[in-house]
Amino acid sequence: MSPSIILLVVIIAYVSFLYWFSSRGKKRGDNDTFFRAGRRASWPMVAIGMIGASISGVSLISVPGWVQSTQMTYLQMCMGFIVGYAVCAFVLLPLYYKWRFTSIYEYLQIRFGAKTHRTGTSFFLLSKYLGASARLYISCLVIHEFLLAPLLLPFALTAGGVLLLIWGYTKRGGISTLVQTDVVQTLCMIVSLALLFIISAQHLGLSFQGVVEHVRGSEMSRIFEWNGSSRQGFWRQFLSGIFIVVVMTGLDQDMMQKNLTCRDLRSAQKNMCTYGLCFLPINFLLLALGILLCAIYAKHGVSVPTNGDTLLPHVISSGWLGTLVIIPFGLAMISAAFSSADSALTALTTSTCVDILRLEQKDISAHQAQHIRRRIHFGWTLALFLGILFIKGFDQGSIIDTIYVLASYSYGPLLGLYTFGLFTRRQAIDRAVPLVAILSPLLCGILDHLAPTLWGYTFGYELLFLNGAITFLGLFMFSRKPDTP
């Protein structure tokens, strides 16, 4: 049986199960269910599901390919992730639960005003749209190469089909549906990753102890880099990891919307800390898989691809690991694609309805509000489809690196806004905030371009907290002391 037919069977079975699983129970389609899941979700279910939402197909493809260029230094950033999740759990979650927000950007309305609220929301929508498009692109690309490319069918058909499937099972239940389906998707992804690791080790004739010794003895197993001028320097990576989690989880409606479905603050904090601790071992497994894949290339006398994103797909398509390996690989990619994209689509819809259109403040019937929400939901589905096609035309390197660079520019103003709001009592001038938020990433772009020439320094992901610091200073310049003591 050909790999294409096997993958097609896996997709049909997986999607059928997903639709059946998501349709169980009460079939409510109101906005409270879509936005908040009635705030009745169990925190262990949310924690398991958020692992899948955070580890997308980009991680499955790009992280193993990083070992040939940066060894295992990515784990330094993962160590910073743990601290970042603690900040989210004990600094940001208490704020969100105190006000019982539907959208976390409602805080900006309360703290600063309407223009700041819309500015923060706009930067989130831009950031999430670009990141979700990039993540879904790499998953659709891999699925397409195995399924439709041999039939000479266009890539747009794969992307459109995947998005229509995701739209189909999220259009009614929204976040309530995702709390359930993400558990299935995460478990499928982790089991599939473990199977890929075992199959690769067996192909190399390595036992568990042999895998440990092989990974430990590899020149690609280096974790720590103490050269401060390197982009992989420990403190640059560690601090970047902290801030990336704070903005891409704590200040991200997509990730926090699931936390806010928990029954109370304590449950949400347990959820945040539990799944935050999972990223270090999972990414270690992905990097170790990358080392095994490089050994497979060496065994067959083939040069390792220069583009790390093709490392795993090429091994699968080569047939070296047999035909049936397409099952765990396909299941992992489909689970990652659906888990990442469905939560992003729901968050984009929620933020547009709650923050931009202010549906919950309008004097309209529940039926009208539900109808508007469904139209917005489909509109974002179409926008993601166009974003995937756009990224395909410009893909030239590691997608995960591109996502982190984009986050450094687009989430920086949000970092500055929330830091200024939480740690000062000054009142920013609401009408000046959009100007500050736009100029900050522009100034970062200029510094990023000039730094190698002027100072011999190349910025990495620390552009994120530089961006946030510039935004903070700009807000301080355009602010006044509070009116009341």
Image (cartoon, grey):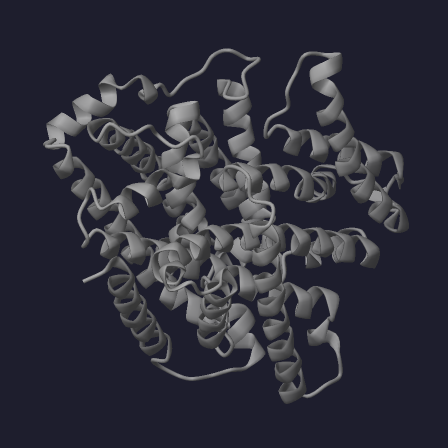
Which one is in front, 433 or 112?
433
439 relative position to 255: left or right: right
Q: Using the rendered view, name the quadrant where residue 218 is placed.
A: top left
The picture places residue 340, in percent across and down from the top left corner, at: 46, 56
The picture places residue 145, in percent across and down from the top left corner, at: 39, 55
The picture places residue 402, in percent across and down from the top left corner, at: 57, 39
481 relative position to 336: left or right: right
168 relative position to 428: left or right: left
Quadrant position of the N terminus in the picture:
bottom left
Tell me if residue 393 comes above or below residue 451 in the rendering. Answer: below
Which one is in front, 118 or 267?
118
Would you say residue 397 is visible in this rendering?
yes
Q: Residue at x 25, y 51 (%)?
A: 192
Q: Residue at x 25, y 54 (%)?
A: 326
Would you say residue 56 is visible in this rendering?
no
The picture places residue 317, in percent across and down from the top left corner, at: 29, 48
Q: Residue at x 50, y 26 (%)?
A: 238
Q: Using the rendered view, name the quadrant where residue 45 is placed.
A: bottom left
Quadrant position of the C terminus in the picture:
top right
Which one is in front, 279 or 41?
279
Tell me if residue 370 comes above or below residue 308 in the rendering. Answer: below
Residue at the farthest front position: 152
Tell me if residue 202 comes above or below residue 356 in the rendering. Answer: above
Q: Residue at x 33, y 21 (%)?
A: 220
Query: Tag count in the figure?
Result: 0
